[in-house]
Image: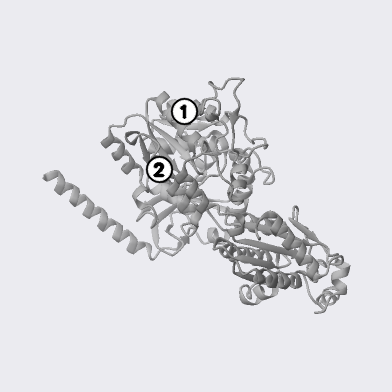
Amino acid sequence: MKDSLNHSESLLVHFRRMESLKAEAVRYPSIHLNKRQLCNLELLLNRAFYPLTGYLTQEDYERVLDFQRLSDDTVWPVPICLDISEKSAQSLSQNERIALRDEEGFILAVLKVKSLWKPDLRKEALRIWGTEDPEKHPGVRSFFDETGSWYVGGSLEGIQLPFHYDFNEIRLTPPEVHRRFSRNGWRNVLGFHAEDFLHRSHVEAILSAAREANSSILIHPSIGLGDPGEPRYYALVRSYFEILRNFPKNLIMLALLPSFSIQAGPREALLQAIVRKNFGCSHFLVARDHADPFAGQSGTERFYPPHSARKLVEEYESETGIKMVPFEPFVYVKEKAEFVSPEELGAEMQPSELSPSELLRRMENDLKLPEWFTYPEVVAELKLAFPPKSAQGFTIFLTGLSGSGKSTLAKVLLVKLMEMRDRPVTLLDGDIVRKNLSSELDFSKEHRDLNIRRIGFVASQITKNGGIAICAPIAPYEESRRHNRELISQYGGYIEVYLSTPLETCELRDAKGVYAKARAGKIKGFTGIDDPYVPPANPEITIDTREFNPIEAAQKVLLFLEEQGYVR
């Protein structure tokens, strides 16, 4: 009874402290965190990133880059810093307290600034990913695109964890997972990091590894950047529930992890192992190409050497306290009608394979999946996540110089697609968007990029909800076009159409007289005159409107859409 009262009193003291801290934090300067930053904050606050008690200071950051250790010599492979803009950095000072807010403005924590510096992002990329070339590594490209130019480090006082309204029954903190392990009598637990759909071969491989380690299993998917407004996200999480039905009930547990992949190979594998140790796991499964940006892509050379992630996790086992277990993929052999391990696969056996690209092709074309590959319940979720192309939304992104024929082609395509009457169609013409969505922007490179990204965001929402977006801006820069491709391709089709009509032809068509004004110096920064147009690297369709009239050009696009399965 006395212990119960003491616990209640401590909870009351904690609650009052949090309320007082929240009241104080309202007066502090604020930083609003994006989804990526919210993931790291949550893992700091819930102790998944133990022993960290806040964001790394500059001293710890440099030690992590150079030695994979904190300044107290604790193993830590990846910097956890709060990146901010230069403008925000200029307003901060040492020992200042900052309120950290979510995207809606709710205060989640207070950061006491201990360190503020401008990092060498190229050095960081080279140390963490092994290259500073964004063209060679998508993780490096995302890092450069998304990271603020300044870092702030310091200790955190948590007020509350980020809010979630989905799957809260399996959004478990490290202490909650520890308690469940203890109640189940699990001493050895094998952690499995998942990011994609799991199938029969995964189940066989995980069970085999668990038997080898004499352990129970924690299926621990990384879902930090999952979109609760996206059907594919729900299908993925629901598929994990279905997968659990194929394991012994007293051997398996599912919990979601609010993290995201940076595709950093060995270093990321080591970080994932440390996180699983903090959740109570004794063992961690590591794949041959763990956290490699090209893992799962058939015919593509891996970025990191084979087994390098396993070697690094194994190297630090005595310090991290978690053992590396190799994840060995099982393959299905028709002759035996069962899955076998690589050791059991004889030279005379012919394994049946279904690559990720072939799986996607079958889903997009509504083709049957072989029974040996996955479970019927998972197939049902896959169909929700990857509907056939004829039922998907898609974006047609027209790009080219002013006067190249974008707006006219877009209007013809709008009519032709509307006539089909199977999906709603929205036209996002460059001039219309400028007037209604980006009227405050000028024509600097920064603002042009922002305008194109706004168009991409709107198009992504239309695509995600099964509609057709036709975009017709100039979009002169490859970076913003690539950003839109990556964003929209998550939700449906993306067809880039390059109107390659030469500059001299566009000038002859200059109905608005803008080229003449640019030549006379009355308009500055005009694309094609005193600002460059960078042609797309790999457009799906290229059209020179000197050779095609608008109807013929539209027909060329429609034939491509039919060939790819987007329209019937």
Which residue type does callout 2 highlight?
Ala
Location of residue 554 in the rendering, given as x and y in whole percent from the top left corner: 75, 66
Give the mark nearer the N terminus: 2 vs 1.
Answer: 2
Q: Which is nearer the eye, 556 or 488? A: 556
Q: Position of residue 9 (x, y in %)?
A: 18, 51
Dot 1, crowdedness within 10 Å: few (<14), some or many (≥20)?
A: many
Going by the picture, which residue comes out furthest to the bottom?
512
Q: Nearer the viewer, residue 136 or 70?
A: 136
Q: To which residue does mark 1 refer?
A: 324
Is residue 53 in view from this perspective?
A: no
Give the spatial CA distance, label 2 vs label 1: 19 Å
510 relative to 279, above or below: below
Q: Quadrant of the C terminus?
A: bottom right
Q: Nearer the viewer, residue 445 or 343?
A: 343
- Name the residue: 32% across, 59% down: 21
Give SS at disc 2. Answer: loop
The mark lying in front, picked from 2 and 1, is 1
* Residue 489 location (% of width, % of height): 61, 55
Crowding near pointer 2: few (<14 within 10 Å), some, many (20+)?
many
Residue 38 appears at what percent x and percent y? 46, 54
Disc 2 target residue: 48
Secondary structure beneath disc 1?
strand
